[in-house]
Amino acid sequence: MEQKPIAELMNLSGKTAIITGGAMGIGYAIATRLAEAGANVLIADRDEEKAAMAAAALNERGWKASSTVADVSDESQVTAMVARAVAGFGSLDILVNNAGIYPTKLVLESTKEDFEKVIHVNLMGAFFAAKAAAGAMIAQGAGGKIINITSIDALHPSSAGLAFYDASKHGLWGFTKNLALELAPHGITVNAIAPGGVLTPGTGLGAPADPAIAKITAAFTAKIPMHRMADADEIGKVALFLASDLSSYMTGSQVVVDGGTLLA
Ligand SMILES: NC(=O)c1ccc[n+]([C@@H]2O[C@H](COP(=O)([O-])OP(=O)(O)OC[C@H]3O[C@@H](n4cnc5c(N)ncnc54)[C@H](O)[C@@H]3O)[C@@H](O)[C@H]2O)c1
């Protein structure tokens, strides 16, 4: 097999990537690295204004990006998101299922609706997007890359109050492995990234919006062997690896990026 030069391995020119929940946090960090590598990036988010601002920030750096509003828990919006990527950029090669929510509530205080909300965004949303994206990728016949952002909570619970989140992320990891099996014959790889604690707006980067989240974040940091939360770009760099030819023979894998948290 011919050995490609490193620069070529990471070159995503001519490829199109959708990043769900790409307006901020981990999703925006991933969008930034993929755009820097040359990909056309479609930032899809339920927050239309923030998504547009994020795409504009990438354009200002000379990279190709646009935005669309899409709530991943709504199948029709997700189908429209995929159609927009193909119509706007001519193809779809990379899907990053990043959109996710992590409300904290004890099971004994929760309702069926609380459970459904988390599952609909974190798990069903990934299904809607993967199904639509894989359909487009198979039609193109050039393979593709699907990356699901799980969590170390897909492997081990981090704290009480996240039972529905943990159920969704364990589910997303199972979904990743089985979809990898299904799509391998089409040259589409499906992998997951399991971040530990990452500094994002959702986990209270800057002023924590939710005191419950801030408490979890502080307890988390104390237990991390590397004694710090990750910068979102530390997930972006691993996403670039999984989106590029550097990971050409990987499918059905979950890359843990947690500063050693699961070792402790
Ligand atoms: N931050 C962490 O410590 C951490 C750790 C492990 C896993 N994760 C996972 O990483 C992903 C991103 O987390 P984050 O911390 O960057 O979150 P965040 O809250 O900072 O940002 C999430 C983004 O997703 C968007 N979003 C939320 N629900 C959506 C929906 N239904 N449809 C479309 N967009 C939606 C939001 O508008 C926002 O732009 C999530 O899946 C989360 O579970 C985060």
Image (cartoon, helix red, strand yellow):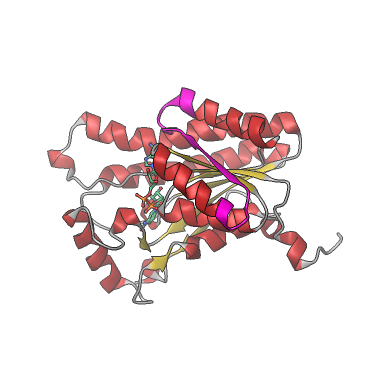
Residue 253 visible in this rendered orientation of the protein: no
x, y percent for residue 45: 44, 39
Indicate the quadrant containing the N terminus: top left, top right, bottom left or bottom right. bottom right
Q: Is residue 73 magenta?
A: yes
Name the residue rendered at 47%, 26% in the picture: 77
Residue extending farthest left: 109
- Badge count: 0
* Vertical position of residue 198 compared to residue 225: above or below: above
- Whether residue 60 is visible here, answered yes or no, is yes
Identified at 74% across, 60% down, the residue is 9
Q: Is 110 left or right of 227, judged from the image as shown?
A: left
Picture coordinates of residue 246, whole percent (x, y): 69, 60
Residue 144 position by quadrant = top right
Magenta residues, start to end: 59-77
Q: Is residue 15 left or right of residue 203?
A: right
- The percent position of residue 81, horizontal first and vertical second, equals 53, 31
Point out the image quarter for the C terminus.
Answer: bottom left
Give me the residue at 72% from left, 57% from top.
Answer: 11
Q: Looking at this rendering, what residue extends furthest in the front direction?
A: 60
In the foreground, 118 or 25: 25
| Residue at the extreme bottom of the image, as rendered | 226
Judge whether residue 214 is colored magenta: no
> At which x and y percent is residue 146?
59, 44
The quadrant where residue 145 appears: top right
What is the residue that sits farthest to the top in this orientation? 76
Image-based side of 181 in relation to 187, left or right: left
